[in-house]
Image (cartoon, rainbow, N blue to C red):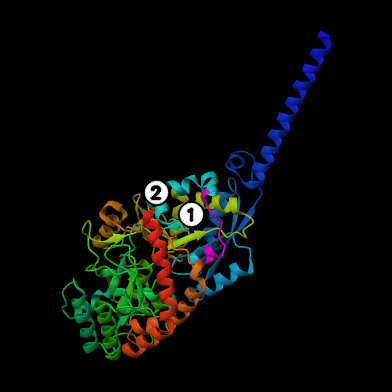
Amino acid sequence: MKKSIAAVLMMLLLVQIALGCSSSSNNESDAEQTGSPAAVEGAKLDPVTLKIIIPGDRPADMDLVIAEAEKRMADTINVKLDIVFIPWSDLASKTQVMLASGENVDLIFDAPWLHMEQMIAAGYYEPLEELLEKYGQDAVAVRSQQMFDANKFQGKVYALPLGNSHLNGRTYLVRKDLREKYGVPEIKTYEELIDFAYKIKQNEKNIIPILAKGLPGQKDQAWGAYRSFMTFSPEILRSDALGQSIILHYKNNDGKVYNLFDEMDPMVWSWIEEARKLYTEGLIHPDVLAIKDADTIFEAGNIAIYATNDFGVPTKISTAISQNTPGAEVEAVTFMPLEKGKVTTNFKQANFQAIPKVSKNKERAMMFLNWTAKKENYDLLAYGIEGRNYEAIGDDQYKSLPDSKYGFFPYAWVWNPTLDRLNAGFDPVSIEHYKFNANADNLIASVLTGFSFDPEPVANEVSLYNAIEDKYYSALFNGVMDPTETWNELKSEGEGYLKKIQTELQKQIDEFLKK
């Protein structure tokens, strides 16, 4: 009997060992297939090619950067990169077609001002919480908790927020050489900026005083609407429902949605009327609505003032304009304050990288995003090859090299506030602005921080209204069309749709604030 029991126990022990080995083997196999960190540390992963969609134009040195990145990833996450650039003018339509048609894409740029909410509502993007927890620890660590909390959609993280600040900068790029030529002191106010524009109009026949943007996807940089970024009594803040438009807006940090169709704000109307005056008097570029690449127009050297995003003068612009127009210099002018407790923010970012649900490589896509959150890898993708495209200045600044053929676009796929370097060529004031706004405590927290609008209940109205607004908005705020006639047409066609959007937005805000 004792021998029989011993034999049975031995058999059970052998079965358990066998099961344990089988379980271990299966776990290792699963790890390799899903690309888990355990597989990265041990057995080499099979190669995977990630298709990544980025806005803009492909830099000449992009292939060299990709080759270096793939070399670094070969023994770890073993990823190849298929980077597809889409021109800004085609970005909204082409990316929407890609997603709607089910084209296999692994990472894609999107933004609230593009069609982020609509794509999420339509179910195109994968929620990232689980992927971030398993494979994205470094990608999380280089972003503040406020950045993640404020950039959820429908209560979930649907895309990785891209930003190097808690507040987006806005800057007028000004031809410094022309300002000094006519003895104009450094520009400190908007009124002085306009006086300079008139000085150019009077004295420089081949120079257009003002360049703004006029495409439907660039409505925030239409000349009159751009004024809202540097006006603080009251602040006119864009709504979560319409992205770039100020027809619906917030103010007073009171949780209310304001509609210019209900009551036109006198200050906003003054911006519209002034834009019309500047346009009819020949100060704003006559083809403002048709220009697809405003940077290139400014770089040609025949523009005196250009409204742009961010702080400072981009190296690409300063280099190009000095080459095209010998002796030309550009300086940054902003009226955004360096005063604690003056500016309201909801900590939201303007740009995101999402993983589409159709992706067959979701785990590896997150592992790649995590890989970019290492300093040496971030530097490579953000600035190019050191010694060829840029020179590192200390730990937090860089200098773009004169013959570099790698454009600046970390904002489209890797941007974060921890690893980002500031352009060493920026003026001290611009650097001060970046550092000031990187500190969340310097800013007023919006009562809507963390709120995200679900457009699904009014998806049809949003689509119809946006199509209407695209016909009139940029023309209205760039002064191209008569203000009263244009406003009346916009209102008559869009008022009904916008009221439904406003009502739904306010309803969701009220529910958010109750919680």
Is residue 374 visible to the viewer in this orientation of the structure?
A: no
- The answer to whether residue 511 is left or right of residue 234 is right
* Residue at disc 1, secondary structure: loop
Label disc, if present, on residue 145 of the rendered structure = 2
* Amino acid type shown at disc 1: Val
Residue 123: image quadrant is bottom right
Label 1, residues with CA under 10 Å away: few <14, some 14-19, many ≥20: many
Residue drawn where x is 23% and y is 57% of the image: 341
Residue drawn where x is 38% and y is 61% of the image: 510
For the magenta stretch, what is the residue range?
Answer: 118-129
Please provide percent x and percent y for residue 218: 41, 75
Q: Which of marks 2 and 1 is nearer the N terminus?
A: 2
- The answer to whether residue 341 is left or right of residue 317 is left
* Residue at disc 2, secondary structure: helix
* Amino acid type shown at disc 2: Gln
Q: State which quarter of the image contains the N terminus.
A: top right
Residue drawn where x is 55% and y is 49% of the image: 131
Label 2, residues with CA under 10 Å away: few <14, some 14-19, many ≥20: few
Q: Name the residue under label 1.
A: 157
Residue 256: image quadrant is bottom left
In magenta segment, residue 225: no
